[in-house]
């Protein structure tokens, strides 16, 4: 990569400023490394709220949901659930934990029917407890109703207060129950009309699947913030948060559910309707491309692996550094690391290995072992990085704690230089659309310069992909002409909120 202009200190620090190891860094205190919390204490990463999967007209709907949820497990690991309809009767089971822990063969056999919806959850709104596990199931005037959703309703607290003052009694702390109450109070003559009326009151990001005793209704928010796709398996119709779930069950991708669209399935077939006009421009969550979605998924017709490779290539062109090895932080950054390596000619190596079988907590017999707990989840390959100048590719920096620990892992393994490249702009603002983010004060980029972050994570140099680089990397991969991306976490421009509403929301989360 010859002939590149040097990058200014405002963006990337000079490699001549050598960091040093902090031997006094303590990772955890307590009986195990993440006592009283989940693995965010180690992996300081953002979390998607959940994933949904729906089946209409397949004799083995519960098994399809089971395998679909397995494919969507990365979107939520707190709870899982499936609800099916058989001869107009509901059958459902929900539980805390991974899909394979919640369901076994007898459980699935107890869920007969040709219609079903499934859900995996990671809570961003509502407590982590069984009552909030989805699908949520209700009795209402027309029979049974089950709801599964991915996303977050920004104005749910206001609607909830209004409903409670009018006499509603809530059984959960989930945003989804608010929608159920709106549907129950609607005077509309059918479930689809009641859903339309209810969804028009919502401000936020969502992909909903509803089932009654004889219908299924699916809808996506007007901005298309959350991904939602329609598939086909023989005579059956399927819905999913990502296309990778269709591959898992042998289904064919048909198309994305359009922003503002409402699809109705019943004995008469399928009807394409609308609950609202699509926003003038889509605002698909950019973090789906950067981090959340699986590399083998397509989001709004953009392949995730291809987009991430382009992000890595763009980073290489914008922030080249002479090095011996390129490595990515598994798993979301591997594609970008391959792109960076291809663009620069620097060899790509597996410099970091993720242990996929560690579970959520580790009981440690001593403080010394607790402080080494980072190596239980991630380890550096000494023979790959020892004596080498390493470029480490990652998707984001949230609080900075994880980046620091990983950089130090590489140094402990003998890396002589560690240059960090991030495939997103600095994450400086909280998200209100279904991503679990810390308060603004905890987001390191909200108060620190790039150089200050570099020093805190102990890197030789640091560079973040620009908004323009991110947009071009995604858009050049085949995005629809009307595709746009929500980048509120980078630029503070929230697509569903006015400037005043955004200021209030951010202030409340500071």
Image (cartoon, rainbow, N blue to C red):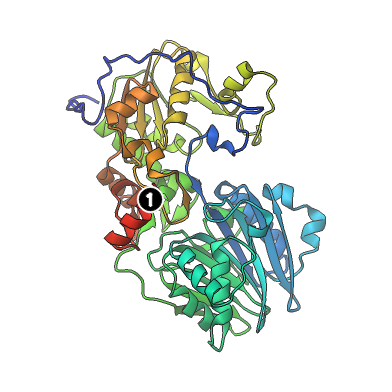
Q: Position of residue 324 (x, y in %)?
A: 37, 18
- Residue 74 makes an appearance in the image: yes
Residue in the image at 60% along x and 50% along y: 71
Residue in the image at 29% along x and 55% along y: 493
Q: Which residue is mark 1?
A: 286
Residue in the image at 61% along x and 81% along y: 266
Q: Position of residue 74 (x, y in %)?
A: 57, 46
The quarter of the picture where the N terminus appears is top left
Q: Residue furthest right?
A: 106
Q: Position of residue 181 (x, y in %)?
A: 57, 74
Residue in the image at 44% along x and 65% along y: 155
- Residue 483 makes an appearance in the image: no
Q: Residue furthest front?
A: 165
Given residues 261 and 26, the one toward you in this image is 26
Given residues 198 and 412, the one toward you in this image is 198
Q: Is residue 79 left or right of residue 162?
A: right
Which image quarter: residue 311?
top left
SS category of the residue bearing label 1: helix
Q: Is residue 152 above or below residue 19?
A: below
| Dot 1 alpha-carbon crowd within 10 angstroms: few under 14, some 14 to 19, many 20 or more | many
Q: Is residue 148 left or right of residue 322?
A: right
Which image quarter: residue 281?
bottom left
Q: How many marks?
A: 1
Q: Is residue 216 left or right of residue 486?
A: right
Which image quarter: residue 6?
top left
Q: Residue furthest bottom?
A: 189
Q: Position of residue 150 (x, y in %)?
A: 52, 59
């Amino acid at each position: 990569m010859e002939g590149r202009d040097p990058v200014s200190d405002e963006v990337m620090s000079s490699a001549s400023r050598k960091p040093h190891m902090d031997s006094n860094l303590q990772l955890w205190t307590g009986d195990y490394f993440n006592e009283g919390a989940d693995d965010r204490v180690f992996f300081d990463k953002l979390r998607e709220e959940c994933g949904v999967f729906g089946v209409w007209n397949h004799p083995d709907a519960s098994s399809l949901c089971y395998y679909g949820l397995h494919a969507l497990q990365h979107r939520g690991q707190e709870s899982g659930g499936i609800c099916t309809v058989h001869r107009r009767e509901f059958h459902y089971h929900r539980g805390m934990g991974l899909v394979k822990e919640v369901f076994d063969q007898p459980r699935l056999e107890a869920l007969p029917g040709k219609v079903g919806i499934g859900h995996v959850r990671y809570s961003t709104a509502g407590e982590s407890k069984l009552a909030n596990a989805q699908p949520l199931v209700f009795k209402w005037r027309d029979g049974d109703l089950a709801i599964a959703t991915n996303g977050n309703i920004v104005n749910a607290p206001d609607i909830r207060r209004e409903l409670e003052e009018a006499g509603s009694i809530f059984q959960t702390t989930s945003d989804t129950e608010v929608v159920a109450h709106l549907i129950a109070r609607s005077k509309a003559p059918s479930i689809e009309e009641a859903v339309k009326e209810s969804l028009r009151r919502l401000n936020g990001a969502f992909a909903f699947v509803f089932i009654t005793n004889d219908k299924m209704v699916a809808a996506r928010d007007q901005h298309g913030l959350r991904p939602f796709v329609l598939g086909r398996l023989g005579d059956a119709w399927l819905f999913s948060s990502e296309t990778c779930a269709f591959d898992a069950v042998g289904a064919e991708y048909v198309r994305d559910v359009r922003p503002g669209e409402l699809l109705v399935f019943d004995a008469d077939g399928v009807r394409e309707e609308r609950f609202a006009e699509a926003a003038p421009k889509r605002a698909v969550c950019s973090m789906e491309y950067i981090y959340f979605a699986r590399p083998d998924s397509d989001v709004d017709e953009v392949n995730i692996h291809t987009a991430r490779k382009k992000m890595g290539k763009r980073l290489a062109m914008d922030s080249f550094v002479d090095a011996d090895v390129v490595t990515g932080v598994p798993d979301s950054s591997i594609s970008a690391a391959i792109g960076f390596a291809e663009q620069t000619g620097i060899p790509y190596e597996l410099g970091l290995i993720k242990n996929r079988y560690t579970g959520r907590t580790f009981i440690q017999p001593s403080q010394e072992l607790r402080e080494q707990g980072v190596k239980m989840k991630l380890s550096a390959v000494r023979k790959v990085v020892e004596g080498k100048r390493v470029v480490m590719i990652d998707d984001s920096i949230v609080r900075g704690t994880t980046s620091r620990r990983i950089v130090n892992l590489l140094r402990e393994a003998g890396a002589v230089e560690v240059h960090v490249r991030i495939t997103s702009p600095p994450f400086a603002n909280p998200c209100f659309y279904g991503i679990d983010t810390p308060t603004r004060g905890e987001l390191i980029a909200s108060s620190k310069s790039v150089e200050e972050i570099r020093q805190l994570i102990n890197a030789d140099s640091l560079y973040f992909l620009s908004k323009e680089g991110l947009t071009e990397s995604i858009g050049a991969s085949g995005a629809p002409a009307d595709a746009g991306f929500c980048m509120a976490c980078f630029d503070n421009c929230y697509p569903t909120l006015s400037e005043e509403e955004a200021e209030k929301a951010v202030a409340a989360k500071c």
